[in-house]
Amino acid sequence: MATKNRSTRSKLESVKLEYHHGKLLKPAHRLPFVGGKGHNGGISFWNVPASGGFPGGTETGDALASSYLKFLRDHPEDVMSSVLLQWIALDMCERYARVGGAERESLAGQITGFFSGFSRFAQEYPQARPDLDQISEAEILSRANAGLAGWSRTAELLKGAA
């Protein structure tokens, strides 16, 4: 048992995430999971070591969801707040498609843990959105099915702005 504890302690010392205080200008860039080079040549919004297996990954993901939620609370004016979750999800998906084996298992845990942590917050949010009562199930399915056919509200808005 002592060997296992030493092994775990050694791993904890070798794989660490840190906040990037003062290193970059934008508050979102200070998050411990943001940094390094992303798949498109820009910054990565899920730069987390793929280690710890599925159980360790869920713990890591859940903890990092708390970091993300604190960022949203502390920086509501940050322009990145409205797009950060999308970038996180895209970088998670891109990375998941690229890795295999134990790394993929760890990353699957991180993704599961992150969205589980986020969903605890999301469970409370609908009470703050009375406008949800104005949207029918038919409207929701209509939008979802239009998206499956390639339609995008954002693309339509961009066309109108041009």
Image (spheres, rainbow, N blue to C red):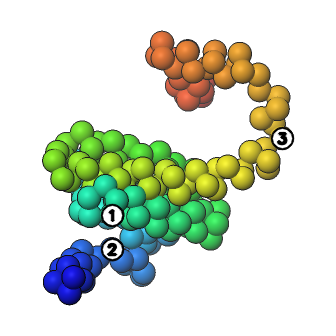
- Please tell me whether mark 1 or mark 2 is closer to you in this view: 1
Q: Which residue is mark 3?
A: 130
Q: The disc labelled 1 sits on which kind of residue? A: Gly
- Whole-Å distance between the Cαs marked 2 and 3? 38 Å
Question: Which residue does the image show at 77% across and 26% down from the upper left?
Answer: 135
- Whole-Å distance between the Cαs marked 1 and 2? 14 Å
The first of marks 1 and 3 along the sequence is 1
Disc 3 crowd, CA 10 A, few/some/many (<14, 14-19, 20+): few
Image x and y of residue 5, in percent: 24, 83
Residue found farthest to the top: 149
Examine the rendering and report whether any part of residue 75 can be seen: no
Rendered-image quadrant of the C terminus:
top right
Q: Is residue 162 left or right of residue 30?
A: right
Image x and y of residue 12, in percent: 26, 79
Look at the numbered disc 2 and give the secondary structure of its residue: loop
Question: Residue 139, labelled with which disc?
Answer: none
